[in-house]
């Protein structure tokens, strides 16, 4: 069996393509690589697209927390200073925040997009080898991450 190389891109169905495009570009900093009336392709600036937003049908059921499907998706930023900047921007934009967590190998903030999808922005606190060892350590415990 072929071994996966990496997770490629994420596609979300959204209630309002214009509002979601505005949120992901103006609040989260994604760039538009292609925009159509029924979908927007967004990039972090290095590849063709990292995230796509498709207009859901009018009668689509809302995202329901804790149900089957996506729990959250994660977006990496460069370092803790960048993460603090994201956190401050989210608070300034009145984005619904969920929690901040120090996982040991990463520092993370969790929040919701306009449709209720949970998003994690994180930075690595360790290198890859140390992070993998820390992730599997039985004594590792998540802690609250204080950014204020």
Image (cartoon, rainbow, N blue to C red):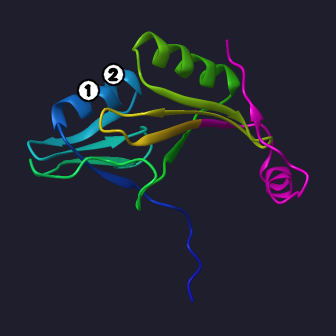
Most extreme residue toward the right is 139
Quadrant housing residue 126? top right
Q: CA distance from mark 2 to mark 1?
A: 5 Å
Label count reads 2
Mark 1: secondary structure: helix
Tell me if 139 is positioned left or right of 93 in this view. right
Where is residue 40? Give x, y as percent: 22, 43
| Residue depicted at 11% across the width and 52% down the height | 57
Residue 121: % across, % down: 55, 35
- Residue 134's place in the image compared with 80, above or below, is below
Identify the residue under disc 2.
26
State whether residue 111 is above or below residue 75. Answer: above
What segment carries the magenta color? 122-148
Check if residue 124 falls in the magenta segment: yes
- Residue beneath the point at 43% across and 38% down: 44
Question: Where, quadrant-wise, is the N terminus in this rendering?
Answer: bottom right
Q: Quadrant of the C terminus?
A: top right
Q: Position of residue 135 (x, y in %)?
A: 79, 54
Q: Secondary structure at mark 2?
A: helix
Mark 2 neighbour class, 10 Å CA radius: few under 14, some 14 to 19, many 20 or more: few
Along the line of sight, which residue is nearer the eye, 118 or 64?
64
Q: Which mark is residue 22?
A: 1
Indicate left or right for 113 with 21 as reference: right
The answer to whether residue 99 is magenta is no
The percent position of residue 96, horizontal first and vertical second, equals: 43, 25
């Amino acid at each position: 069996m072929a071994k996966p190389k990496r997770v490629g891109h994420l596609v979300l169905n959204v209630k309002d393509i214009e509002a979601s495009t505005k949120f992901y570009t103006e609040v989260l900093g994604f760039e538009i690589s292609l925009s159509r009336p029924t979908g927007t392709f967004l990039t972090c600036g290095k590849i063709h697209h990292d995230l796509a937003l498709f207009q859901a049908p009018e009668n689509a059921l809302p995202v329901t927390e804790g149900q089957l499907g996506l729990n959250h998706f994660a977006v990496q930023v460069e370092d803790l200073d960048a993460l603090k900047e994201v956190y401050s921007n989210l608070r300034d934009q009145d984005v619904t925040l969920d929690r901040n967590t120090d996982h040991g190998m990463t520092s993370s903030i969790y929040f919701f997009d306009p449709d209720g999808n949970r998003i994690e922005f994180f930075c690595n606190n360790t290198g890859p080898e140390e992070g993998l060892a820390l992730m599997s350590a039985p004594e590792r415990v998540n802690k609250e991450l204080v950014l204020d």
